[in-house]
Image (cartoon, grey):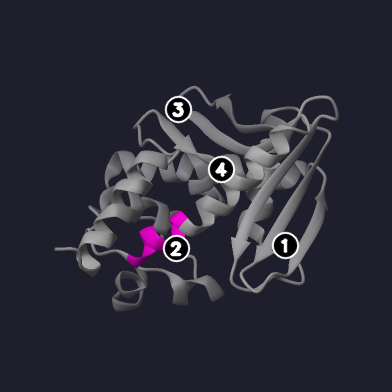
Amino acid sequence: MIDARTVYGWFKKLIERTNRVVYDSNAIHVSEVSGCLRKAFYERKTVRPTLDVRNVIMAIGNGVHWQLQELLKEEGWKSEVKAEWDLKKFKLIGHIDLFKPEENVVLELKTIGRVPERPYLPHLRQINAYLIMIKARKGYLVYIGKNGAIRVFDVKFDKKLWRETIKRAFHLWYCLQENRPPKPEFSGLCSFCEFKWRCYNQ
Protein backbone atom coordinates (compact mmCIF):
# COMPACT_ATOMS: atom_id res chain seq x y z
CA MET A 1 0.00 0.00 0.00
CA ILE A 2 1.25 3.49 -0.91
CA ASP A 3 0.14 6.37 1.28
CA ALA A 4 1.48 9.83 2.25
CA ARG A 5 3.92 8.26 4.74
CA THR A 6 5.39 6.15 1.91
CA VAL A 7 5.97 9.21 -0.29
CA TYR A 8 7.45 11.22 2.60
CA GLY A 9 9.83 8.30 3.08
CA TRP A 10 10.91 8.54 -0.55
CA PHE A 11 11.69 12.23 -0.13
CA LYS A 12 13.68 11.54 3.05
CA LYS A 13 15.82 9.00 1.16
CA LEU A 14 16.19 11.42 -1.76
CA ILE A 15 17.51 14.21 0.48
CA GLU A 16 19.84 11.84 2.31
CA ARG A 17 21.23 10.70 -1.05
CA THR A 18 21.62 14.16 -2.62
CA ASN A 19 22.50 16.22 0.45
CA ARG A 20 25.93 17.81 -0.07
CA VAL A 21 26.51 18.46 3.63
CA VAL A 22 28.24 15.65 5.51
CA TYR A 23 28.65 16.68 9.14
CA ASP A 24 32.16 16.33 10.51
CA SER A 25 33.51 17.73 13.79
CA ASN A 26 36.57 18.99 11.86
CA ALA A 27 34.54 20.90 9.29
CA ILE A 28 32.09 23.79 9.31
CA HIS A 29 30.05 24.49 6.19
CA VAL A 30 29.62 27.95 4.67
CA SER A 31 25.88 27.34 4.47
CA GLU A 32 25.82 26.76 8.25
CA VAL A 33 27.50 30.05 9.19
CA SER A 34 25.68 32.13 6.60
CA GLY A 35 22.35 31.90 8.40
CA CYS A 36 21.28 31.56 12.03
CA LEU A 37 24.01 29.78 14.01
CA ARG A 38 21.52 28.41 16.51
CA LYS A 39 19.56 26.79 13.69
CA ALA A 40 22.79 25.31 12.30
CA PHE A 41 23.57 23.88 15.75
CA TYR A 42 20.14 22.22 16.02
CA GLU A 43 20.39 20.93 12.44
CA ARG A 44 23.43 18.92 13.52
CA LYS A 45 21.98 17.75 16.81
CA THR A 46 18.46 16.77 15.68
CA VAL A 47 17.43 13.43 14.20
CA ARG A 48 14.87 14.11 11.47
CA PRO A 49 11.57 12.25 11.34
CA THR A 50 10.44 10.54 8.15
CA LEU A 51 7.30 12.69 7.94
CA ASP A 52 9.14 15.94 7.30
CA VAL A 53 7.71 18.49 4.85
CA ARG A 54 11.12 20.15 4.75
CA ASN A 55 12.46 17.17 2.78
CA VAL A 56 9.83 17.77 0.09
CA ILE A 57 10.54 21.51 -0.12
CA MET A 58 14.31 20.90 -0.30
CA ALA A 59 13.89 18.27 -3.01
CA ILE A 60 11.85 20.66 -5.18
CA GLY A 61 14.56 23.34 -4.83
CA ASN A 62 17.29 20.78 -5.54
CA GLY A 63 15.45 19.72 -8.69
CA VAL A 64 15.53 23.26 -10.10
CA HIS A 65 19.22 23.56 -9.18
CA TRP A 66 20.10 20.26 -10.83
CA GLN A 67 18.30 21.03 -14.09
CA LEU A 68 19.95 24.44 -14.44
CA GLN A 69 23.35 23.02 -13.52
CA GLU A 70 23.03 20.33 -16.18
CA LEU A 71 21.98 22.89 -18.79
CA LEU A 72 24.80 25.33 -17.99
CA LYS A 73 27.49 22.64 -18.18
CA GLU A 74 27.04 22.96 -21.95
CA GLU A 75 28.11 26.62 -21.64
CA GLY A 76 31.30 25.91 -19.72
CA TRP A 77 30.00 26.16 -16.15
CA LYS A 78 31.19 23.67 -13.52
CA SER A 79 28.65 22.62 -10.88
CA GLU A 80 28.98 21.71 -7.20
CA VAL A 81 32.55 23.00 -7.03
CA LYS A 82 34.03 22.20 -3.62
CA ALA A 83 35.98 24.98 -1.89
CA GLU A 84 37.98 24.73 1.35
CA TRP A 85 39.59 27.25 3.69
CA ASP A 86 41.92 25.97 6.40
CA LEU A 87 41.29 27.66 9.76
CA LYS A 88 43.73 25.39 11.65
CA LYS A 89 41.23 24.09 14.21
CA PHE A 90 38.82 23.09 11.44
CA LYS A 91 38.14 23.59 7.73
CA LEU A 92 35.50 25.86 6.29
CA ILE A 93 33.83 23.94 3.46
CA GLY A 94 31.64 25.23 0.65
CA HIS A 95 29.89 23.76 -2.40
CA ILE A 96 29.46 26.36 -5.12
CA ASP A 97 26.38 25.96 -7.30
CA LEU A 98 28.10 27.08 -10.51
CA PHE A 99 31.58 28.37 -11.42
CA LYS A 100 32.83 29.48 -14.85
CA PRO A 101 36.64 29.20 -14.85
CA GLU A 102 37.19 31.13 -18.13
CA GLU A 103 35.44 34.19 -16.68
CA ASN A 104 36.33 33.44 -13.03
CA VAL A 105 32.73 33.98 -12.01
CA VAL A 106 30.57 32.33 -9.32
CA LEU A 107 26.82 31.87 -9.65
CA GLU A 108 24.64 30.97 -6.66
CA LEU A 109 21.03 29.86 -7.20
CA LYS A 110 18.25 30.42 -4.66
CA THR A 111 14.73 29.07 -5.16
CA ILE A 112 12.42 31.12 -2.98
CA GLY A 113 8.75 31.83 -2.30
CA ARG A 114 9.00 35.53 -3.09
CA VAL A 115 11.89 37.29 -4.85
CA PRO A 116 13.35 40.00 -2.56
CA GLU A 117 14.05 43.65 -3.45
CA ARG A 118 17.55 43.30 -1.97
CA PRO A 119 19.69 40.21 -1.33
CA TYR A 120 19.25 38.53 2.03
CA LEU A 121 22.26 38.84 4.34
CA PRO A 122 22.74 35.05 4.78
CA HIS A 123 22.93 34.65 1.00
CA LEU A 124 25.42 37.53 0.72
CA ARG A 125 27.60 35.92 3.41
CA GLN A 126 27.52 32.66 1.49
CA ILE A 127 28.46 33.96 -1.95
CA ASN A 128 30.98 36.40 -0.45
CA ALA A 129 32.78 33.46 1.19
CA TYR A 130 32.80 31.55 -2.09
CA LEU A 131 34.36 34.52 -3.89
CA ILE A 132 37.47 34.51 -1.70
CA MET A 133 37.62 30.74 -1.25
CA ILE A 134 37.84 30.15 -4.99
CA LYS A 135 39.49 33.53 -5.78
CA ALA A 136 36.71 34.57 -8.15
CA ARG A 137 36.53 38.15 -9.43
CA LYS A 138 32.75 38.49 -9.06
CA GLY A 139 29.56 36.60 -8.39
CA TYR A 140 25.89 36.54 -9.29
CA LEU A 141 23.18 35.80 -6.76
CA VAL A 142 20.15 34.50 -8.66
CA TYR A 143 16.74 34.38 -6.98
CA ILE A 144 14.15 32.17 -8.65
CA GLY A 145 10.64 32.77 -7.32
CA LYS A 146 8.09 29.98 -7.17
CA ASN A 147 5.74 32.36 -9.03
CA GLY A 148 8.22 32.52 -11.95
CA ALA A 149 9.84 35.85 -11.03
CA ILE A 150 13.63 36.08 -11.31
CA ARG A 151 16.06 38.67 -9.93
CA VAL A 152 19.85 38.72 -10.31
CA PHE A 153 22.28 40.65 -8.10
CA ASP A 154 25.94 41.35 -8.92
CA VAL A 155 28.17 40.66 -5.91
CA LYS A 156 31.77 41.75 -5.31
CA PHE A 157 33.97 40.60 -2.46
CA ASP A 158 33.49 42.38 0.89
CA LYS A 159 36.43 41.98 3.29
CA LYS A 160 34.42 43.07 6.36
CA LEU A 161 31.70 40.51 5.65
CA TRP A 162 34.36 37.78 5.25
CA ARG A 163 35.91 38.61 8.65
CA GLU A 164 32.46 38.40 10.20
CA THR A 165 31.89 35.00 8.53
CA ILE A 166 35.17 33.65 9.96
CA LYS A 167 34.17 34.80 13.47
CA ARG A 168 30.80 33.10 13.08
CA ALA A 169 32.49 29.88 11.94
CA PHE A 170 34.70 29.82 15.06
CA HIS A 171 31.74 30.60 17.31
CA LEU A 172 29.67 27.74 15.86
CA TRP A 173 32.64 25.36 16.08
CA TYR A 174 33.20 26.14 19.78
CA CYS A 175 29.47 25.80 20.52
CA LEU A 176 29.40 22.38 18.85
CA GLN A 177 32.49 21.26 20.79
CA GLU A 178 30.90 22.35 24.07
CA ASN A 179 27.42 21.11 23.10
CA ARG A 180 26.07 24.59 23.86
CA PRO A 181 23.59 26.20 21.45
CA PRO A 182 24.49 29.71 20.22
CA LYS A 183 22.20 32.59 21.15
CA PRO A 184 19.12 33.05 18.94
CA GLU A 185 19.45 35.41 15.97
CA PHE A 186 15.93 36.75 15.65
CA SER A 187 14.82 37.82 12.18
CA GLY A 188 11.92 37.64 9.76
CA LEU A 189 13.06 34.11 8.88
CA CYS A 190 12.24 32.81 12.38
CA SER A 191 8.61 32.19 11.44
CA PHE A 192 9.80 29.62 8.88
CA CYS A 193 12.21 27.87 11.27
CA GLU A 194 11.30 24.44 12.60
CA PHE A 195 13.29 25.11 15.80
CA LYS A 196 11.69 28.48 16.69
CA TRP A 197 9.79 27.03 19.64
CA ARG A 198 13.09 26.29 21.42
CA CYS A 199 14.13 29.94 21.15
CA TYR A 200 10.78 31.48 22.07
CA ASN A 201 10.32 29.13 25.04
CA GLN A 202 13.60 30.40 26.46
The 10 Å Cα crowd at callout 3, few under 14, some 14 to 19, many 20 or more, is some
Which label number is shown at residue 57?
A: 2
Q: Left or right: 198 with respect to 172?
A: left
The x and y percentages for residue 89 are: 44, 25
The x and y percentages for residue 157 are: 79, 41
Calculate the distance from the C-alpha at mark 4 to the C-alpha at mark 2.
30 Å
Q: Is residue 180 visible?
A: no
The 10 Å Cα crowd at callout 1, few under 14, some 14 to 19, many 20 or more, is some
Name the kind of residue labelled 1 in the image: Pro
The numbered mark, 4 or 2, whose residue comes first in the sequence reads 2
Question: Nearer the viewer's eye, disc 1 or disc 3?
Answer: 1
What secondary structure is marked by label 1?
loop
Count of numbered labels shown in the rendering:
4
Name the kind of residue labelled 2 in the image: Ile
Instruction: Name the residue beneath numbered marker 1.
Output: 119
The 10 Å Cα crowd at callout 2, few under 14, some 14 to 19, many 20 or more, is few
Q: In which quarter of the image is the N terminus?
A: bottom left
The numbered mark, 1 or 2, whose residue comes first in the sequence reads 2
Instruction: Name the residue beneath numbered marker 3.
Output: 90
Calculate the distance from the C-alpha at mark 4 to the C-alpha at mark 1.
21 Å
Q: Residue at x 64, y 41 (%)?
A: 69
Which label number is shown at residue 167?
A: 4
Residue furthest to the front in view is 1
